[in-house]
Amino acid sequence: MIVNPYLNFDGNAEEAFRFYQTIFGGELFVQRMSEAPGTENLPDNEKDYAMHVSIPIGDGQHLMASDCLKSQGHELNVGNNNYISITPDSREEADRLFNGLSAGGKIEMPMEDMFWGDYFGSFEDKFGVRWMINFPGNTK
C-alpha cells in the first residue's frame, strides 16, 4: 500500500509546493487548469491555477494537491482535521524536516522525546497544512 497525501489550496498550490520542494527535493510537476479540456470559460486568474501538482516524498510516494475553483463552486475550508504524518529514517532527518517545514508556521509541539518512546513534533506550516513528524524510538 502507498499513501499519497492530497491537499487543496486556494490558488497558491504551486507556491506551497515550491516551498515543500526546498525541503523534500525531487522534481516538481505542475499541470495547470488551462491544460484541461473544457476550461476555456474559466476566469483568467483561475486558468493558471494548479489542476494537479506533485513532488516525490519517498519510495513510490508523492505529495499531491490542486487549487479550488471558486467559479465552479469549490470552497476551501482549512481545518485541523488533516495532518500529514511523516516517519523519517533518522532523528537528524526528523529535525531537518521539522525545522524546514515549520518555518513561518505555528509549532504545536516542538520535537521532543515523548512518553510513548518516540521523538515527535507537530505544527501548522505557513500554508495552513498540519504536519506530524514521528521518529520511532528516542535513541539519540
Image (cartoon, helix red, strand yellow):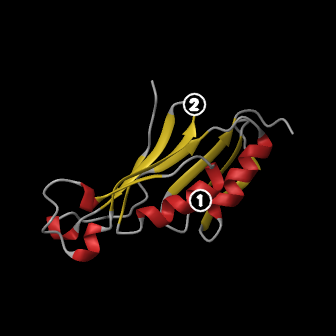
- Disc on res. 77: none
Question: Relative to 38, is 10 on the left or the right?
Answer: right
Nearer the observer, 127 or 22: 22
**Does residue 4 appear anywhere in the picture?**
yes
Residue at x 26%, y 68% (from the top left corner):
47
Question: Relative to 116, is 46 on the left or the right?
Answer: left
Residue 24, position as x, y percentages in the image: 62, 49
Residue 102, position as x, y percentages in the image: 63, 62
**Badge 1: how crowded within 10 Å, few (<14), some, or many (20+)?**
many
Question: Judging from the image, what secondary structure is the residue with disc 1 in?
Answer: strand
Whole-number angstrom distance, CA of label 2 to CA of label 1: 24 Å
Residue 113 picture quarter: top right
Residue at x 42%, y 62% (from the top left corner):
13
Question: Judging from the image, what secondary structure is the residue with disc 2 in?
Answer: loop
Dot placed on the residue nearer the N-terminal end, 2 or 1: 2
- Disc on res. 123: 1
Q: Farthest residue in the bottom direction?
A: 44
| Mark closer to the observer (2, 1) | 2
Q: Amino acid at mark 2?
A: Asp
Counting every numbered tag in the picture gives 2
Nearer the observer, 51 or 9: 51
Residue 72, position as x, y percentages in the image: 15, 64
**Does residue 124 appear anywhere in the picture?**
no
Q: Amino acid at mark 1?
A: Phe
Image quadrant holding the C terminus, namely top right
The residue where tag 2 is placed is 59
**Badge 2: how crowded within 10 Å, few (<14), some, or many (20+)?**
few
Q: Farthest residue in the right direction?
A: 140
Question: Relative to 124, is 23 on the left or the right?
Answer: right
Residue at x 49%, y 63% (from the top left corner):
16
